């Protein structure tokens, strides 16, 4: 695999950073995700400052949501986050989850994505390298990839058009190998011999 298609964790396209729309984040999956305590403390400090600047309360529920997000790997939707917290016995309302996610996105601690569906997907973003996504239009699997050539294009376009580019979003849509194989197998079964 070309070195320029390898992400920060050393995973190439199709590596362990794959997540699907239907992927369930169970408490064990959330607890297995590596949680850097130094990074979590930094994120908590930033979130605390944001709450104070906005004159909002610093509640245990908000920090529990933040910790749950930063203990996860990959993408998740609100229902997955809410269900995971409920399964772990954490008392939090769905409205608090939505409101806290909005605050975290506003602060830049969490990224929100619309991968061609009405259901928003989220991922932690503080201290994580810029990356892009390939999304299967059949099974909705999301695969992250990082290619430094994209950064070069971003820099060149910014220079050419006199823009200071702050960030970018690139989503590529297609049909993954698993879905293509299923379709080919189904076609073979329906073809008369």
Image: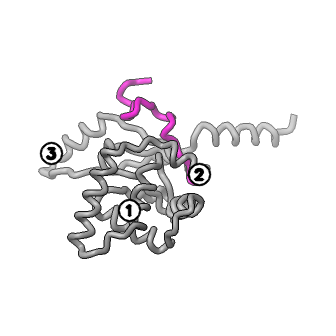
Across and down, in percent, residue 61 comes to 42, 67
Q: Looking at the picture, how far across and down is residue 140, in whole percent?
A: 56, 51
Alpha carbon separation for disc pair 3 and 2 = 47 Å
Residue 63 disc label: 1
Q: Is residue 19 magenta?
A: yes
Q: Which mark is residue 160?
A: 3
Q: Is residue 73 left or right of residue 193?
A: left
Counting from the top left corner in percent of width and height, residue 11 is at: 44, 31
Q: Secondary structure at mark 3?
A: helix
Q: Secondary structure at mark 2?
A: loop
Mark 1–mark 2 CB contact (< 8 Å): no
Q: Is residue 117 visible?
A: no
Residue shown at 32% from the left, 56% from the top: 109
Q: Nearer the viewer, mark 1 or mark 3?
A: 1
Reading the chain from its start, which is encountered first: label 1 or label 3? 1
The span from disc 1 to disc 3 (Cα, nearest Å) is 43 Å
Q: What residue sits right under mark 2 in the picture?
A: 26
Image position, residue 21 (x, y; %):
56, 53
Residue at image coords 45%, 68%: 97
Whether pointer 1 and pointer 3 mark residues with C-beta atoms closer than 8 Å, the reply is no
Q: Which residues are magenta?
A: 1-24
């Amino acid at each position: 695999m070309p070195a320029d298609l390898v992400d920060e964790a050393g995973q190439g396209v199709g590596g362990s950073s794959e997540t699907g729309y239907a992927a369930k984040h169970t408490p064990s999956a959330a607890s297995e995700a590596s949680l850097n305590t130094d990074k979590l403390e930094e994120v908590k400090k930033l979130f605390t400052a944001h709450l104070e600047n906005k004159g909002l309360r610093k509640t245990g529920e908000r920090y529990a949501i933040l910790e749950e997000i930063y203990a996860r790997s990959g993408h998740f939707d609100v229902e997955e986050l809410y269900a995971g917290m409920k399964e772990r016995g954490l008392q939090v309302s769905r409205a608090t989850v939505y409101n806290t996610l909005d605050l975290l996105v506003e602060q830049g601690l969490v990224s929100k994505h619309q991968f061609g569906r009405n259901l928003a997907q989220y991922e932690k973003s503080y201290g994580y390298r810029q990356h892009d996504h390939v999304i299967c239009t059949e099974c909705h699997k999301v695969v992250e990839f990082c290619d430094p050539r994209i950064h070069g294009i971003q820099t060149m376009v910014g220079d050419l058009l006199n823009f200071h580019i702050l960030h970018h979003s690139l989503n590529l849509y297609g049909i993954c190998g698993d879905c293509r194989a299923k379709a080919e197998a189904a076609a073979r079964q329906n073809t008369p011999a």
